[in-house]
Amino acid sequence: MNKTILITGGAGFIGSNLTEYFLEKGYKVVCLDNFATGHYHNIAPFLENPNYTLIEGDIRSLEDCKKAVAGASYVLHQAALGSVPRSINDPITSNEVNVSGFINMLSASRDAGIKRFVYAASSSTYGDSESLPKVENVIGKPLSPYAVTKYVNELYADVFSKTYGMELIGLRYFNVFGRRQDPNGAYAAVIPLFVKQLMKHEAPTINGAGDYSRDFTYIDNVIQMNELAMLTENPEAINTVYNTAVGDRTTLVDLVDYLKSYLSEYDSEIANINPIHGPNRVGDIPHSLASIEKASKLLGYYPTHTIDKGLKEAVQWYWEHLK
């Protein structure tokens, strides 16, 4: 366990959870983050840990990437500008971070002889494909600049694996949620945003009729997938992509009902709050449901948290930290 893991975007929601997990397992962890979307409070508990190193830098800088990978055995690449609406409002910056930054990290990792490079891919890659459940080798055309950038990541990873002999694994995240996910800002994810609004006795706004569905995936399932991908010795499991999900879907209307139920255990008035409905959001796919058969077969993945178990834990965390 004396090996070093570089976690890019390590001050963000997923990155800080990965950092906490691997520090507890005895690894050395280097965090590279420019704090564009990450937060110092996410990493505050780690700063005194002798096995933790923070590098404040940007993946758009090749020199920062080279500095960060020095001495690392593994890279868990989480750094990106997420959010479909953000990419629609500013496609240039999304491309600079998600594509140019990704190539910088691949190149720096290649030159440093990194053993395994695991990167955050996205379910948005499925685009306009209407087939359900989503299976890794059946995708459609992207519906947003963000989706384009994440698909390009997969293409570059494939080329780098074939051209330079690198070991790369992409994890197509499906609507990840859980502790430390930021409820604030213009591009806050739906679960923390709804939780914050309900705790303030505000009516959450559902885009459209609320019948769009998502495969909401708790953070502990994502941590498990990263660890399995990082450590697998199965040659068939390397240089490919995996759905990182639960294999179940929940509509937005049902999501609000779940949250009202769990939050009303702390504040009974929340049970009486009803959502309001706005227009559908540009670039959104109607339904998202993952097949996790490939991850189960090749990586031994078994999700520990269903949507209800994950939401209960997330709601408890937000109640303790947002009050």
Image: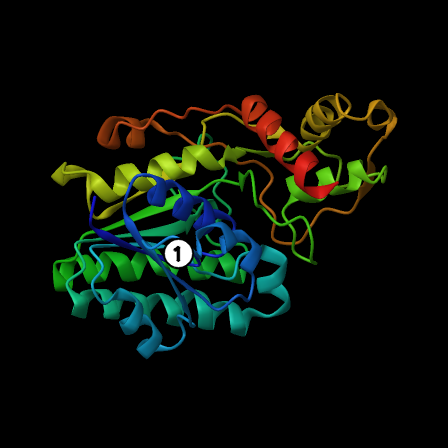
x and y percent of residue 98 in the render?
43, 65
Camera sees residue 137: no
- Mark 1 is on which residue type? Tyr
Whether residue 78 is situated above or below residue 71 in the rendered picture = above
| Picture quadrant of residue 320 | top right
Looking at the rendered structure, the number of numbered marks drawn on it comes to 1
* Colour scheme employed for the rendering of this structure: rainbow
Q: In the image, 144: left or right of 319? A: left
Q: Position of residue 178 (x, y in %)?
A: 55, 38
Of helix, strand and loop, which one carries label 1?
A: helix
Q: Is residue 301 above or below residue 193?
A: above
Where is the C terminus found, in terms of image quarters? top right
- Which quadrant of the figure has residue 63? bottom left
> Residue placed at 27% from the left, 58% from the top?
157
Residue nearest the viewer, comparing 292 with 20: 20
- The crowd level at tag 1 (other Cα within 10 Å; few <14, some 14-19, many 20+) is many
For image coordinates 61% across by 62% down, the residue present is 86
Task: State the image coordinates of residue 126 (x, y, percent, origin top left).
Answer: 45, 45
Query: Is any part of residue 157 visible from this angle?
Result: yes
Placement of 70 over or under 239, stated as above or below: below
Image-based side of 317 in relation to 14, left or right = right
Q: Closer to the camera, 222 or 3?
A: 3
Indicate left or right for 75 with 267 as reference: left
Which quadrant holds residue 50?
A: bottom left
Where is mark 1, residue-wise? 151
Quadrant where the N terminus sits is top left
Query: Left of 62 or right of it: where is 314?
Result: right
Q: Residue 57 versus residue 250: which sits nearer the camera?
A: 57
- In the rendered image, residue 215, in percent from the top left (x then y), is placed at 52, 33
Q: For this rendering, which residue is in front, 222 or 236?
A: 222
